[in-house]
Image (cartoon, rainbow, N blue to C red):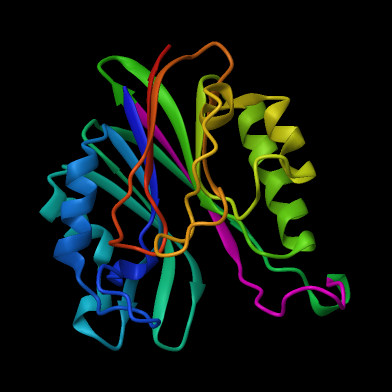
Amino acid sequence: MKIATYNICHCANFENWDGGEGPINVKRTAEAISEIDADIIGLNEVYTSGDREDFELQEEKLAKFAGYPYYVFAKGKEFPWSTIGNAILSKYPIVSVKKIIVSAPTPEERNPDENEWYEDRVLLCAEIDMNGKNIYVISTHFGLNRTEVIRIVEAVCKEIDTHSEVVLMGDLNLLPDSEFLEPLYARLKSVAKELGNNEYTFSTFDPQVQIDHIFVPKIAKIKKYTVYKNKVSDHRPISAEIEF
């Protein structure tokens, strides 16, 4: 199976980047997704509603334009201009869906030296029937602050511990050697780390860090890992070909 993850930056296009955010182009983002040709792809920063037509139902449009018959969306935060969240597109039937909200820390729980950008985060969990074999996929997007990360890692580990053959993917906003990833390494293995691939995933126009990740069960055989060099979004999509 081929799995992928992609922070699409709500379909903003950065191919002609001039220092600002590019125009919304849902069809170009769908083309980039189609070119990856994954069986399952998790998407971060997807808009599903808003005050503009191109903010509406991006997950549905992307599934249609990229040729995915099955898709699901889970909202994270409601901004004044749109509702943002994660999506999973699949070529195979989605058997069940679980959406777990990880609330932003309260003011009392926050550290004074943290970034002020707090959001409610969400784990989008989907059980997918891959020709008779069910795979549990978690697509998520971690926050930037310590208190946020600790909370969402706990939620992810709880899901991993209650399911077999889990695939975790998303923009985790953490470097591969981050101490916050240690509980995940204890349960799963990083595709990039296993293959010794340190290619940067952010940003596309000035790559400096590897913060997008795919984790798979330790029993899985990793055949290939790819970081795509397009500049459609501000993140580079990544994919992995694995066998159970």
Q: Residue at x 68, y 24 (%)?
A: 187
Q: Residue at x 46, y 29 (%)?
A: 136
- Between 65 and 98, the one lying in front of the other is 65
60 to the left or right of 1: left
Res. 129 image quadrant: top left
Q: Position of residue 2 (x, y in %)?
A: 31, 27
- Residue 193 visible at all: yes
178 to the left or right of 88: right
In the image, residue 185 sits, relative to residue 147, either above or below, namely above
In the image, residue 197 sits, relative to residue 140, either above or below, namely above
202 to the left or right of 156: left
Q: Quadrant of the N terminus?
A: top left
Q: Position of residue 140 (x, y in %)?
A: 52, 50
Over which residues does the magenta segment extend? 110-128
Res. 106 image quadrant: bottom right
In the image, residue 78 sits, relative to residue 241, either above or below, namely below
- Residue 47 visible at all: no
Q: Position of residue 141 (x, y in %)?
A: 54, 55
- Between 219 and 32, the one lying in front of the other is 32
Q: Quadrant of the C terminus?
A: top left
Q: Position of residue 198 (x, y in %)?
A: 55, 37
